[in-house]
Amino acid sequence: MSTEKNTTHTGGAPAIRSDDELRQVALAHIADTRIGLLAITREDGVPTIRPMGFAPIETGAADVYFTAPTASEKARSLRLHPRVNLFLQGPLSDISAYKAVSLVGEAVELAHESAEFQTAVAALSARMPFFKARAEKGDLSASAIFRVRTAELRLSDYAQKTGLALVPL
């Protein structure tokens, strides 16, 4: 277990949390969240945000998979500008319990022929019934699957008085 402490806080007495605890909380939030906001740069250079269903590549991982139509503006933009930020926010009913995770990294398109593509299909199918139905019909030829290779992970957990904290990967 790491002995480093993170004292980023939102006010009041700062929470002192180990890197391992921050990582566990952030990864649990990724596993529990189904839809995030994906910040991308469009082909014309304009930043935009899209709602996005996703699936962690495996339990306890910060990298995630998501899908988009192969010919869509989103897929074309990601091929040109692969740097993304996937923001996963918890319910907003009580600001004192606010929790969010931000995954910053590169969106890499998976080749349909790759073994990882099949792994991603299984992960996405487990979380998205509509995607599973398409996969079972063999209807993925017009679908691109991307993996976010997370380079930076950040956590806000107001219940624990943790503001935006950098989480070691």
Image (cartoon, helix red, strand yellow):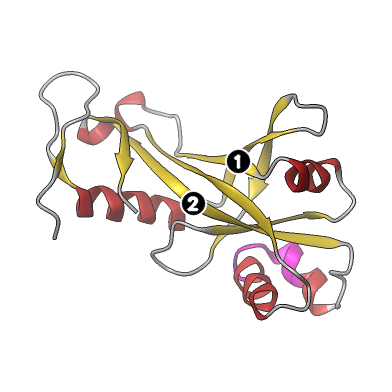
Q: Which residue lies furthest to the front in this view?
A: 80
Residue 166 locus on image (x, y percent): 32, 39
The residue lying at 64 percent from left, 70 percent from top is: 120
Residue 60 locus on image (x, y percent): 38, 64
For the N terminus, give its image quadrant: bottom left
| SS majority, magenta | helix
Between 11 and 40, the residue placed more toward the observer is 40
The residue lying at 14 percent from left, 19 percent from top is: 12
Residue 147 locus on image (x, y percent): 62, 59
Q: Is mark 2 on a helix, strand or loop?
A: strand
- What number of labels is visible? 2
Circle 1 crowding by C-alpha within 10 Å: few under 14, some 14–19, many from 20: many
Q: Which mark is residue 159?
A: none
Q: Which quarter of the figure has residue 139?
A: bottom right
Label 2 sits on what residue type? Thr
Q: Is residue 144 above or below residue 137?
A: above
Label 1 sits on what residue type? Val
Q: In this view, does 51 lie to the left or right of 95?
A: right
For the C terminus, give its image quadrant: bottom left
Q: Is residue 21 left or right of residue 157?
A: left
Residue of label 1: 84
Residue 130 lies in the magenta stretch = yes
The residue lying at 30 percent from left, 49 percent from top is: 168
Q: What element carries label 1?
A: strand
Q: Which quarter of the figure has residue 31?
A: bottom left
Between 35 and 8, the residue placed more toward the observer is 8
Residue of label 2: 150
Residues rendered magenta in the picture: 126-132
Circle 2 crowding by C-alpha within 10 Å: few under 14, some 14–19, many from 20: many
